[in-house]
């Protein structure tokens, strides 16, 4: 049985240490500049990766991140980080809030999903060469992916923006949060179908994969949610707190992720659905959620976002025309769709536009979506760089634009 050599173990430990230190330093810098921590963590990755260190000091870069077994193990850490990030994104979804908002949330979420999805799909389908779709056999899947990437939102980023503006508990804040929950749920379900279309090695047929995906989602949000809700009081009573809750919740997360990976859907979808089912329990306290968030956001999340900068050279793969087009489509689709939907829900035009700016934040979810597509060969590095920049621009501008329109 092969194992890591002493040099590879040392290289891995140094890599993890440098990534965590740089990620933390630049995350704190971003916070001081009133920007999301993810912005600083990605900048740290750009500095450590081929974009800056690899170009200025290629020898240092190759010594710090050498190819081989240590690189493979680091990729494993990054994959686990992605699964955990989607798990805590699912914890943010409160189905009770969705039901309370009723048809208002349906209007905002569906129009905020359908119109951006339509924009992304149509442009990618009609202009395949410009948008980087060079393989005719995957052109439909590629167009569906671009539609999904325009429609998806970043629930944790939106919640943080609303908290900063003191709007989270307002009528508009609840509508935005509930609409983002529905949009993310449907968006990840669509993306799971896209992954089943692109020639990933399948254990099952596409139809069986689709049926099992829908069945898994329904079962987890009904029967699974009920079982976990009944089991949590027993876990809290019999196991050491919070260690027992933390280990068991992550164990269920990994099992759900493993199941969806087996049926041909990426593991992140299973983790997201398990997070939704667990987070909706009345026995999972806010303090318990905060502990899970702190554990993942301060250890695994920085590893993932710093690793984004290690994947590609953002300078050589930067296409200004493609990036501007993707940013424009993202803004236009969300503002028109979410704004119109919020207006139909009974809000003023000013409030509707403010809500659409909030729904426009893509953040971590867009980046995870892009990385999964890149790893599965659906998009190229040029498109990936444009999607990451779009995610950062929409996340950075959402809060200031909401504040500006509401002040007016």
Image (cartoon, helix red, strand yellow):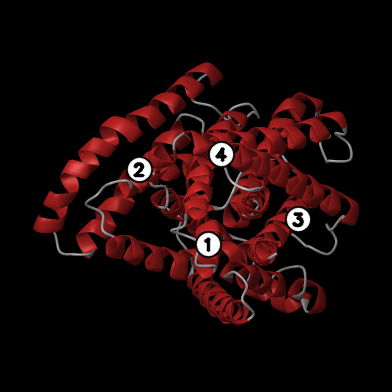
Q: CA distance from mark 2 to mark 3?
A: 37 Å
Along the line of sight, the residue nearer the viewer: 97 or 291 = 97
Choose the circle earlier in sequence order: 4 or 3: 4
Query: In the drawing, does residue 144 fall left or right of residue 342?
Result: right
**Residue 302 x, y percent position in the rendering:** 53, 68
Q: Which residue position holds label 4?
A: 345
Q: Say which residue appears at 75% left-offset and 37% top-offset.
A: 120
Judged by depth in the image, the label closer to the viewer, 4 or 2, is: 4
Please tell me whether mark 4 sits on a helix, a strand or a loop: loop
Give the residue displayed 52% in from the left and 75% down from the top: 20
Observer able to see residue 149: no
Q: CA distance from mark 4 to mark 3?
A: 36 Å
Give the camera-side residue of 380 and 37: 37
CA gap between label 1 and label 3 equals: 28 Å
Question: Measured from the top left, where is residue 126 in percent x and y?
Answer: 86, 29
Q: Secondary structure at mark 2?
A: helix
For this view, does 61 lie left or right of residue 152?
right
Residue bearing mark 2: 96
- Closer to the chain start, of discs 1 and 3, is 1
Residue matched to label 1 = 162
């Amino acid at each position: 049985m092969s194992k890591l050599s002493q040099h590879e173990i040392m290289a891995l430990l140094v890599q993890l240490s440098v990534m965590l230190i740089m990620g933390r330093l630049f995350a704190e810098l971003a916070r001081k500049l009133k920007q999301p921590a993810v912005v600083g963590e990605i900048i740290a990755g750009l500095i450590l990766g081929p974009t800056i260190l690899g170009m200025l000091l290629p020898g240092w870069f190759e010594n710090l991140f050498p190819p081989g077994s240590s690189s493979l193990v680091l990729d494993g850490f990054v994959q686990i980080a992605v699964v955990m990030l989607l798990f805590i994104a699912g914890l943010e979804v409160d189905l009770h809030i969705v039901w309370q908002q009723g048809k208002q949330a349906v209007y905002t979420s569906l129009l905020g999903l359908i119109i951006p999805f339509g924009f992304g799909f149509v442009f990618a389908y009609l202009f395949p060469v410009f948008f980087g779709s060079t393989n005719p056999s995957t052109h439909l899947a590629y167009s569906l992916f671009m539609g999904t990437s325009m429609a998806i939102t970043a629930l944790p980023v939106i919640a943080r923006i609303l908290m900063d503006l003191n709007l989270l508990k307002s009528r508009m804040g609840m509508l935005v949060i509930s609409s983002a929950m529905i949009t993310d749920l449907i968006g990840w379900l669509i993306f799971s179908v896209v992954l089943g279309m692109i020639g990933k090695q399948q254990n099952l047929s596409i139809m069986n994969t689709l049926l099992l995906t829908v069945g898994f989602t329904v079962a987890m949000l009904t029967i699974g949610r009920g079982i976990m809700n009944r089991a949590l009081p027993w876990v809290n009573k019999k196991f050491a707190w919070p260690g027992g809750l933390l280990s068991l919740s992550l164990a269920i997360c990994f099992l759900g992720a493993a199941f969806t990976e087996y049926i041909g859907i990426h593991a992140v979808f299973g983790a997201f659905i398990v997070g939704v089912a667990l987070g909706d329990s009345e026995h999972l306290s806010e303090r318990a959620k905060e502990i899970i968030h702190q554990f993942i956001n301060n250890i695994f999340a920085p590893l993932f976002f710093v690793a984004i900068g290690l994947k590609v050279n953002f300078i050589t793969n930067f296409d200004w025309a493609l990036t501007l087009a993707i940013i424009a489509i993202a803004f236009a689709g969300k503002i028109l769709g979410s704004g119109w939907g919020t207006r139909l829900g009974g809000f003023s035009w000013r409030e509707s536009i403010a809500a659409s700016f909030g729904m426009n934040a893509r953040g971590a979810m867009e980046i995870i979506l892009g990385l999964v597509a890149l790893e599965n060969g659906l998009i190229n590095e040029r498109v990936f760089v444009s999607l990451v920049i779009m995610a950062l621009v929409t996340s950075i501008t959402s809060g200031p634009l909401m504040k500006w329109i509401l002040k007016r």
